[in-house]
Amino acid sequence: MAKESFDKEIQFLRMLVLTSGAYNRQQFAIRLGISVNTFDKTLRRLKDIVHATYQQLPEEQGKEFAEAIRYRYDDSADPMLLFLFRAKSLKESESRRLSLVLAALNGRPMTASELLDCCMADLPADLSLPDEKTIRKDLKYLEEVGVVRRENGARPYIYRIRNELIHELTDEELLDLYDFVDVMANTQIPSVQGYLLRDGLKKHLVRSGAEKETVEPFLYKYHYHSRILDEAHLFAILDAIRGRRKMKFLYFSPKSDKSYGSQNTNPLFERESQGKLETTLPLKVVYDHQYGRWYVLGYGREGIRKYRMEGMTQVETGEPAAQAWFEEKQAELMDRIRYSWLIDTGRPVTVRARFFSPGGSEPNFIKERVLLQGQWGEIVEEREDSFIYEITVNGTQEIKPWLRSFGSSCEVLEPVQLRRELIAEWKEIRAYYESV
């Protein structure tokens, strides 16, 4: 699957989930920056993926793409994840070949030439047949990702599938492992590898005859589906940071009318893209747990820039930067965000707020939450019914939602401008509830 199509499907899925089907085909296509025909083709492809993913479902539950998205919406985000990664699957010939290699190795250890014979015998006639060099390349890839291992040190090498995990654990131990992976994948970040491991364990347990209720014991209601979709770029960006490599990408700001721009190969249908071509040296990745957003902080021609990962498409890596220069820019970034609640690089300001403790004999959950989430801030004054919290941050924009989330349990004292802004916001909210 080409990179462009992958980006398109990420944005397609994000819009479908976040808008809950509020757009018609024409509005969807305009927002994505593609034609209605391309929209229809993308939808057909994703329906095919739905069919492959949910073959075990009753027919009426797998008919429509939107229905499949909403199926077990409260449970988990693996539909989003599996759509994403199956849409970015290998070419059909590679997928079939690797499946045959793994199926053959599941029976017994084999050499590359024996695996070649298996592929020659079992691959469909309409697919190109591999040579031994191709099989060795496949085995090298499978060895790198930990799926197979070489048994002996001399040629011809014998390869064995690495499935000790499922064969050396009892069914009860596998269920315990599945439950652990399920909880971690649904509550921690990053979660892509966790979901893929969860999917593999689930398939094995189902094949072993485990009841559906046994392998689906938990419900998860507070998912940020876009967080999981953004992880498509996360590991490529982390790899670029480790390698000190610059990145080039087409960026769509959250304020943009479009979230994607198609690559038009036919000059008759060329149109101006709404995205902006950016080149940056990525320095840090930041996750905003409150809104489920990923950010990339990098250095480019305009200095330090911040990008929402959801707006990055057509990501490519370039040449590595000199280590000394890279470290210098990283140090500059860390100095700029030293007082950032998240990623703000504005002027430092001291925020003082009074938090009111809950009445009665209840545990002081307000104080516990402030101590847990308040980062480097400190409680500077404490009374029986309240306490004052103080923190220096780069601007007040990012800390404001956190302060606001405490409702009447928090009163901002300083700075005066932030206090006035919150008063105005609460007055506006109050007006919404005035008698009609």
Image (cartoon, rainbow, N blue to C red):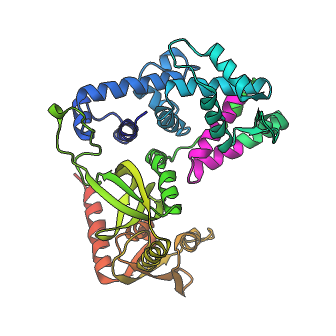
Residue at the front extreme, as displayed: 155
Is any part of residue 218 visible from this angle? no
Residue at the left extreme, as displayed: 268
Q: State the image coordinates of residue 224 (x, y, percent, origin top left).
A: 47, 48
Q: Magenta stretch?
A: 179-204
Q: State the image coordinates of residue 176 (x, y, percent, origin top left).
A: 76, 42
Residue 248 quadrant: bottom left
From the viewer's side, name the closer residue of 353 and 106: 106
Q: State the image coordinates of residue 158 (x, y, percent, origin top left).
A: 78, 33
Q: Is residue 179 left or right of residue 133?
A: right
From the viewer's side, name the closer residue of 260 and 94: 94
Look at the image and tell me in which quarter the N terminus lies: top left
Inspect the magenta stretch and tell me whether residue 214 lies in it: no
Q: Is residue 131 left or right of residue 77?
A: right
Q: In the rendered image of this protein, does residue 28 appear above or below residue 246?
A: above
Residue at the (50%, 24%) spot, across then down? 92
Q: State the image coordinates of residue 233 (x, y, percent, origin top left).
A: 45, 49
Inspect the magenta stretch and tell me whether residue 191 lies in it: yes
From the viewer's side, name the closer residue of 220 and 240: 240
